[in-house]
Image (tube, rainbow, N blue to C red):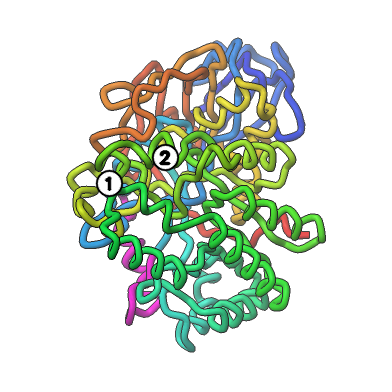
Amino acid sequence: MTTTFVHGGLVVTPDGKHHADVLIDGERIAALLAPGSTALGSDLRSTADVVVDATGKYLIPGGIDAHTHMQMPFGGTEASDTFATGTEAAAWGGTTTIVDFAIQKPGERVLDALESWHAKAAGQCAIDYGFHQIVGGVDHDALKSLEALVAEGVTSVKLFMAYPGVFYSDDAQILTTMQQGAELGVLTMMHAENGIAIDELVRQALARGRTDPVHHGLTRPWQFEEEATHRAIRLAEVAGAPLYVVHVSARQAMARIAEARSGGQNVFGETCPHYLWLSLEEQLGAPGFEGAKWVCSTPLRSRSEGHQDGLWQHLRAGEVTAVATDHCPFCLNQKELGAGDFSKIPNGIGSVEHRIDLIYQGVASGKITAEQWVRVCSTEPARMFGLYPRKGVIAPGSDADLVVYDPCGRTSIGVGKSHHMNMDYSAYEGWEIEGKVDTVISRGSVVVADGQFHGRAGHGKYLKRGLAQNLT
């Protein structure tokens, strides 16, 4: 087996920083050594097969993006990143594991849906991957399938309070799924927006000729996200079930999650880089159809209402469990399906490549610590989704997923720069930011180094996930 020696780095964990050298044997971490240690009886810099110099740089566990949508069908088209292109882009950005969503279409059996996603991903992924299951039709067969999902390593299911006629589940369906899931240890993930009320506002806006992309956000007000989040929390409380609310964009919705957590309820909140950095005024409200680039659900929120600052405050306070991307990219010609009708614009922002860098900007600006950066980008997602301690930690016996991160480096984001996603624009086009991914190691193999991609499609393995490990 290949031995790899990473020396000189400052290891960052959620609990602190310490200098250590890391010995990798094959795909696993074999030992953490004091810098310059001769405990193993030899100079590993001369005897290891591969030597990585991390002097002056951070050494962090590989990133875990627990919310992606590769090749996702939407509105007559499909997300532009395949499992091959999307996972390669993720690797470039320091993410070594994704958890994607298998989608049950109306009338389809849940396990058949999962099998179709296995077929899409098999042999294509450059990094390790797992699946959540979207249940698009809660019925007796779907509920019976939960036990089989757990056996397949799919220990989380996602429901929607939005999109009536497509994925929508009513309160009774949500309650029964939570009850069944609680018995099996399955985590319920929730898209929390009041879809019935949203659809009425959309109808009203279009009837008045308000068709520009900005109205996608204006017809999905924060009150509908807060209300649905609160309702989901109460349903979970009655069911005695854990709840993970995805892509929280409104500070008021995250406040409801924080309140439930302070009361001892197993409720967890996820946000995304675009909700921390972008806004309705500056991006979604761009003139003409330009704002379509930033159409996503939940939508970008108004900066004047304090949503971005509020989410950073919750992250700093430890009330945000994970930062994921909700990566669902579309090219401009795909977004143009909604020209003249904002409700038909494919929903999604691509950022799987830039999550580690974008959240590091919180460290560089003093909003959060480096330890909190690692917590929300790697360690807590690993615990939340049954991957810890195989993933999310630099420790003997864990998978050798490591990122050498240069805090003194600089990253230029944009097409033709640090952009490997299969889309013809970037949501962060032209951004010049602090920090840079230097070297990425996936299960002991160097996949990114010296500005080159050294990985391959098929290196990534499917991960059978266990149950959540951070429930009280």
Residue at image x 22%, y 42%? 332
Q: Secondary structure at mark 2?
A: loop
Number of the label disc, if any, that sits on residue 263: none
Q: Secondary structure at mark 1?
A: loop
Taking the image as shown, residue 412 lies to the left or right of residue 178, namely left
Residue 315 at x, y = what percent? 67, 40
Residue at image x 82%, y 60%? 263
Q: Is residue 77 magenta?
A: no
Taking the image as shown, residue 4 lies to the left or right of residue 265, namely left
Q: Which residues are magenta?
A: 103-124
Residue 80 at x, y = what percent? 26, 47
Q: Is residue 344 above or below residue 184?
A: above
Crowdedness near tag 2: few (<14), some (14–19) or many (≥20) residues, C-alpha within 10 Å: many
Image-quadrant location for residue 256: bottom right
Three-letter code for the amino acid on which mark 2 is drawn:
Val
Image-quadrant location for residue 323: top right
Residue under numbered circle 2: 352
Taking the image as shown, residue 311 lies to the left or right of residue 237, namely left
Residue under numbered circle 1: 330
Residue at image x 52%, y 59%? 464
